[in-house]
Amino acid sequence: MKVRKAVIPVAGLGTRFLPASKAIPKEMLTIVDRPTIQYIVEEVVASGIEQIILITSAGKSAIENHFDYDSALDHALIEKGKTRLAEEMNHLSNLIDVVSVRQKKPMGLGHAIWMAREVVGNEPFAVLLGDDLVLSEQPCLKQMINLFNEVQESVVAVQRVPQKETCQYGIVEGTLQSKRVHKIERMVEKPAPGTTPSDMAIIGRYILQPDIFDILGTTTPGHGGEIQLTDALLALTHSRGMYAYEFEGTRFDAGDKLGYLKAIIAFALRHPDVCENFSDHLKEIAQTL
Ligand code: UTP
């Protein structure tokens, strides 16, 4: 089956980014000239997905508005003769079909994904975390879809992390099947350094078989009273198998202060309008350090 739908959960509280995220969703914070969430939606579109399901919450309407048509803005831009900008705004609102589903309480990532079950239905689907950015030649999701088309089983994107950082991620253990592809055997949530031989950490990109919804529906709340995705992923691994894919590219946790700053630098150094002057500026700063 083909992957046609992508779920993007953006209903979290964003506590790591307070106070910036108090009135503005963290997914709307800017990386050079567009919000984080726009890069993720552009990755989805470039990967051939047909529909996005945003899992939102109160206070996140700016995200929906960002991808909506704004007729007052359109008219104002045209009246001012700014037709190119008006076209750019229209392009943004026509990027892809977006459906929103409300998560009434932030009951965890697993619960947020479960909220998408009616709209996704009985087909494989992608999940992209609204604050995880990947800079790559070929979109990370497209790389994963290529693998899914071969194996027709769930795929999670992984990156190698230093042992001292395993405690921040879900870690997978498995056997190498082919270049960059591992068949998952075990999965451990946030293991203490040295307690797992693996350094393969799950990042915010998944392709899941719809069986995950039944599993999530019966998963009891874990750490912090939240329905954890990792517990359900482990059950899905046992029931029908799952692959870990070492994607090509660099991932940034833009929901974290340091990750966000690193993302701004990486994306600015590739932005045609600012890359040259910004690079000169960074070199000047580096000399003073
Ligand atoms: P995070 O834990 O990174 O995001 O969840 P958070 O909870 O918003 O942020 P902190 O940790 O308090 O700073 C990963 C993704 O899952 C979404 C978040 O919006 C984020 O994109 N999420 C998390 C939900 O949609 N609902 C939830 O109940 C929890």
Image (cartoon, rainbow, N blue to C red):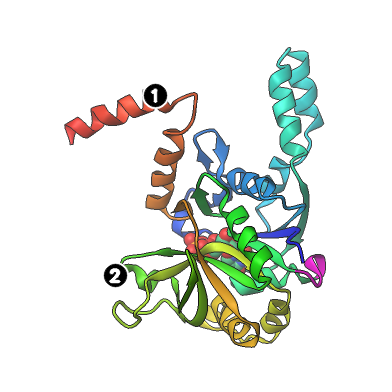
**Residue 23 seen from this side:** no
Q: Give the range drawn in magenta.
A: 118-123
Residue 54: image location, x then y, percent: 70, 57
Q: In this view, does 178 lie above or below 284?
A: below
Tell me which numbered mark, 2 or 1, is placed earlier along the sequence: 2
Decide if residue 130 is on the left or right side of residue 67.
Answer: left
Q: In this view, does 14 lie above or below 200?
A: above
Decide if residue 75 is on the left or right side of residue 195.
Answer: right
Q: Is residue 287 above or below residue 241?
A: above
Q: Residue furthest front?
A: 178
Residue 232: image location, x then y, percent: 60, 81
Residue labelled with disc 2: 164
Q: Residue furthest top?
A: 81
Decide if residue 31 is on the left or right side of residue 6.
Answer: left
Residue 120 on the magenta segment: yes
Residue labelled with disc 1: 276
Residue 142: image location, x then y, percent: 62, 53
Instruction: State the CA–CA distance, disc 2 to disc 1.
Output: 36 Å
Near mark 1 (Cα within 10 A), the count class, few <14, some 14-19 or many ≥20, is few
Tell me which residue sits at (55%, 45%) in the image: 36
Locate ligand 1 by image quadrant.
Answer: bottom right
Q: Specify the amino acid type for callout 1.
A: Glu
Contact, CB < 8 Å: mark 2 with mark 1?
no
Q: Specify the amino acid type for callout 2.
A: Lys
Task: Pick whichever, 24 or 127, lies toward us.
Answer: 127
